Image (cartoon, rainbow, N blue to C red):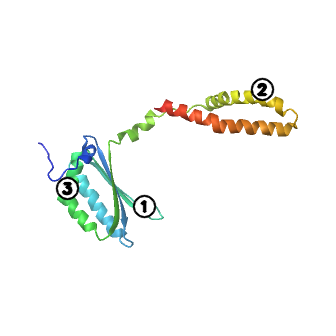
């Protein structure tokens, strides 16, 4: 059976109609004192969405203790299922009923977020402490050596504590302003 949609179609919506799972998240702000009515309505909405063809799941997330927005999340098998749900009579009737207690809503559609849940398996394993330490020493050693060769003869006439403090300050400044940006660029290239 072929399913088609009627009505206007915005080609900017094409990625949202992809054949991948689509997650719709709606953050709603509720008028004070209407929270109980909203929860009854939200439970009806979630129950209705779960019955709808192509729905992979739905749920309501409550705001924190300090207040905030309620989040309703519905996941569909594909963009076509999502669009059919959004145009359904059941959903439209529920949306009309919510108008007197929902004072603000923000919607976000996300296509194909499976990678988020699989990303931990693709992450680089943590390096052992000895390896991190040896890499840091490898970066600091040439800087400290250059300071010892070039700056130490100039600092020989000042007291020991001031000499060590000056050397440490120069090494730290070079590491912070010169070496660290180079390391960041190399890390960024490696992660591409």
Residue at the spot x=37%, y=70% of the render?
Answer: 31
- Pointer 1 local density, CA inside 10 Å: few below 14, some 14–19, many at least 20: some
Q: Which residue is mark 1?
A: 63
Q: Secondary structure at mark 1?
A: loop
Q: Which residue is mark 2?
A: 149
Residue at the spot x=27%, y=59% of the render?
Answer: 45
Q: Secondary structure at mark 2?
A: helix
In the image, which is nearer the foreground, mark 1 or mark 2?
A: 2
Mark toward the start of the polypeptide (1 vs 3): 1
**Residue 178, position as x, y percentages in the image:** 63, 35
**Residue 6, position as x, y percentages in the image:** 14, 51
Residue at the farthest left position: 1
- Residue 78 in view: no
**Residue 60, position as x, y percentages in the image:** 35, 57
C-alpha span from label 2 to label 3: 75 Å
Mark toward the start of the polypeptide (2 vs 3): 3
C-alpha span from label 1 to label 3: 28 Å
Residue at the spot x=27%, y=61% of the render?
Answer: 44
Nearest to the observer: residue 186 or residue 46: 186
Query: Does 91 sit left or right of 131 as displayed?
Result: left
Q: Which residue is mark 3?
A: 87
Place residue 133 in its image quadrant.
top right
Residue 93: assigned label: none
Nearest to the observer: residue 162 or residue 5: 162
Q: Are marks 2 and 3 in contact (CB under 8 Å)?
A: no
Place residue 163 in its image quadrant.
top right
Query: Does 125 sit left or right of 53 as displayed?
Result: right
C-alpha span from label 1 to label 2: 61 Å
Residue at the farthest bottom position: 33
């Amino acid at each position: 059976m072929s399913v088609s949609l009627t009505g206007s179609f915005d080609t900017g919506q094409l990625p949202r109609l992809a054949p991948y799972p689509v997650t719709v998240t709606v953050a709603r702000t509720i008028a004070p004192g209407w929270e109980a009515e909203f929860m009854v309505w939200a439970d009806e909405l979630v129950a209705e969405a779960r019955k709808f063809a192509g729905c992979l799941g739905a749920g309501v997330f409550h705001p924190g203790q300090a207040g905030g927005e309620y989040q309703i999340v519905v996941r569909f098998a594909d963009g076509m299922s999502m669009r059919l749900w959004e145009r359904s009579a059941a959903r439209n009737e529920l949306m009309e009923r919510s108008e007197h207690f929902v004072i603000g809503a923000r919607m976000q559609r996300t296509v194909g977020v499976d990678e988020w849940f699989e990303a931990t398996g693709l992450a680089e394993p943590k390096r052992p402490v000895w390896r991190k330490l040896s890499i840091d020493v490898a970066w600091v050693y040439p800087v400290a050596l250059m300071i010892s060769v070039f700056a130490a003869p100039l600092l020989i006439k000042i007291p020991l504590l001031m000499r060590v403090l000056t050397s440490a300050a120069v090494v730290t400044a070079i590491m912070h302003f010169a070496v660290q940006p180079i390391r960041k660029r190399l890390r960024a290239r490696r992660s591409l």
